Amino acid sequence: MDDGTTTCRTVGWNGISFSCPVNWETFVSGNRHLVFEQDFQPVFELRWHTNTKDRHAAVLRNLQQESDLSLQTTLPSSWKALTASYSVSLLTEKKHSIIKAALLTCRKCHTSILVFFEDSAGSLKDSHNLLRSLQCHPGKENDCTLWAIQDFQLQIPADFILDNYSFAAGLSRLSFSRAGTTLYVCRLAPAAERLQTASLAEIMLTLGDIPVDTAAVIHEDDSVCYQSQPTISQQILIRLKRKMPFHWMTLRHHRREDRLSGLFFEDKKPLPEKTIHAILASYDIIPL
C-alpha cells in the first residue's frame, strides 16, 4: 500500500487491482464495473470479464458494432509497454483522432479489460499510469484476491465468489460464498456515533443476526468475537430450521480512524479457522 507520501492509492475489486490518484473518487457500478470521478466529473471507467483464449478479436468486433468508435491502426509508443502483458487495441471517435477507449486482454489469464476515459491530457496520463499498474490475476505465491475500496482493504482466497455488495450510508457490506461457506464483510462509520447507543458486542450480534446472549461474547482490546460450537444434536435441530449451525464473527473498533470492521462466517460444517484468521489479519482501515 502507499505510505502517504505519494499521490496514489491502491484499489482492488473482484479480481483486479491497480493504483489511481487519491483525488479520484471510486464508485462500484457492478460486479466488474468501476467508475471514477474527479471534482464530481467522470474521468475514467473500467469494465472487465474473463474470456476463453483468443477472444480479443471477437470482443473488439462486438464493441465496434455497438458503439460509434473506430479502431486505431497504429499503437502510440506510450502504449507499447503494455503489449508485453496484454493484447492492446485503441479506439477513437470516428470524426476525430481522440482516443476514447482501450481494450486490453491479458496474455496469461485472458481477462478482457475495457476502459473509457476523458480526452483531457491530465486524465489520459493518469489513466495510462493506472493501466501500467494493473494486476488481473494472483501472483505465484498468493492465491488471494485484494479487495480495497473506500478506506478498507483485505485479502480473501480467490475461490470465494462475490455474491452481493451494498454501500449504504455509514455501512458497507460485501458477501461471498465458497463450497457452502458464507462470508460477510462489514465496515461501519462513524464508530463513535454508533457506540453511543449500543455496545460493540450488541452491534456485532445485530449485524450477524444471531440470537446469542452477549454473555457468550469474548471481549478483547477494541474487539469482540463469538464462535458457535454446537453439539451433534444441536446441529441437527438447527439444520431442521434451515439455518447454519456453525458461526464465527468478530467486530473491531479502529479508534484512530473512527471505524468498525467486521467479519462474519457461517456454514453447515466446522469453519476453516486458519483461513478465517488469515483474512482477519489482512483486514485493515487505510487512512486516505
Image: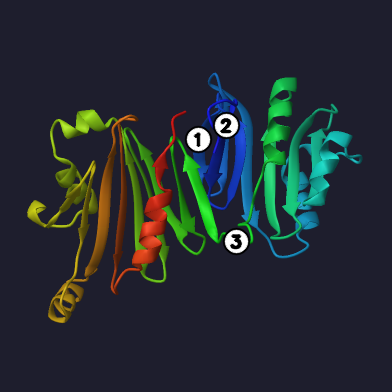
The residue to which callout 1 is attached is: 27
**Left or right side of 234 for 227:** right
Residue furthest top as drawn: 39
- Front position among marks 2 and 3: 3
- Decide: is 77 above or below 251: above
Decide: few, some or many residues near mark 3? Use Cα within 10 Å; few <14, some 14-19, many ≥20.
few
At label 1, the amino acid type is Phe
Name which residue lies at 22% across and 29% down: 192
Query: Alpha-carbon neighbours of circle 2 within 10 Å: few (<14), some, or many (≥20)?
Result: many
The image position of residue 54, as x and y in percent, is: 78, 62
Q: Is residue 7 visible?
A: yes
Image point 55% across, 23% down: which residue? 23
Of the residues under marks 1 and 3, which one precedes in the sequence?
Answer: 1
Residue 278 has which mark? Answer: none
Q: Is residue 82 left or right of residue 205?
A: right
- Place of residue 243 in the rendered image (x, y in percent of width and height, measured from the top left): 22, 68
Closer to the observer: label 1 or label 3? 3
- Dot placed on the residue nearer the N-terminal end, 2 or 1: 1
The residue where tag 2 is placed is 36
Picture residue at 74% right of the left edge, 45% below the top = 103
Q: Residues at badges 2 and 1 in contact (C-beta under 8 Å)? A: yes
Mark pair 2, 1: CA separation: 6 Å
Percent coordinates x, y for residue 78 in the rendering: 84, 34
Horizontal and vertical percent position of residue 236? 17, 79
